[in-house]
Image (cartoon, rainbow, N blue to C red):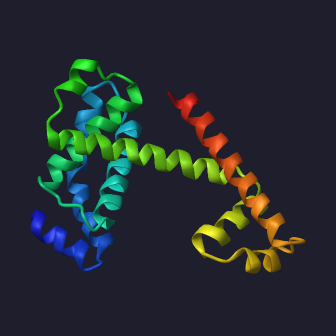
Amino acid sequence: MNDTKILELFKDGQREKAFSKLYHLYPKIETLVLSKGGSKQDASDVFQEALIILNRNLEKSDFKLTSSFYTYLYSVSRFIWKDTQKKFSKQELHNLSGEEVEYFHSVLEEKKYQLAERAFLELGERCRQLLQLFYHKAMSFKDITKVMQFKSEKVAKNQKYKCLTKAKDIYRNSNTVQS
């Protein structure tokens, strides 16, 4: 199946079918990772992460696929593998083409997203609930105070601030550990 038809499947909401068509590219990604000293499990992990990045980008309204799916997934996979190995030389980064910079940026954005998600999951249940009510469900502090049985809106606001600060601290600490 060609790229145009796969792209149509994505646009028509048939993501599962589209992704199953992209799996024919896996052997090439596996060869890449194996040739760089990785294992078959590493290759599988890298390919899955590349597909996640592709999926996130396809959900963005301003994303345009300017290459074939193979070129995109190969480049993103190469960046993921190199990033996991921390083997980027300054010269390599300097010599990236515009399209490669976009792929590399996608990999870095995904890493940030994963770190933020991990930080959120490390919060206590009550903090997670509070932040979800405020940010995800866009509830007012008045409603949050009732739902979570705070004494006042001011207490709810203070608690949200503390939870957010804790999440940021966890994120920063996990980011410095990762580096």
In the rendered image of this protein, does residue 10 appear above or below residue 37?
below
Q: Nearer the viewer, residue 168 or 92?
A: 168
Specify whether 174 is left or right of 33.
right
In the rendered image of this protein, does residue 115 appear above or below residue 179?
below
Find residue 119 and report its horizontal and vertical position in percent: 62, 47
Specify whether 74 is left or right of 134.
left
Q: Residue at x 18, y 60 (%)?
A: 64
Find residue 88 and report its horizontal and vertical position in percent: 31, 23
Q: Which of 174 and 29 is in front in this view?
A: 174
Q: Residue at x 60, y 42 (%)?
A: 171
In the rendered image of this protein, does residue 167 appear above or below residue 144?
above
Specify whether 2 is left or right of 75.
left
Residue 103 visible in the shown view: yes
Q: Which residue lies furthest to the right in this view?
A: 151
Find residue 58 and report its horizontal and vertical position in percent: 28, 64
Q: Which residue is drawn at 80% across and 75% down?
A: 145
Residue 134 falls in image quadrant: bottom right
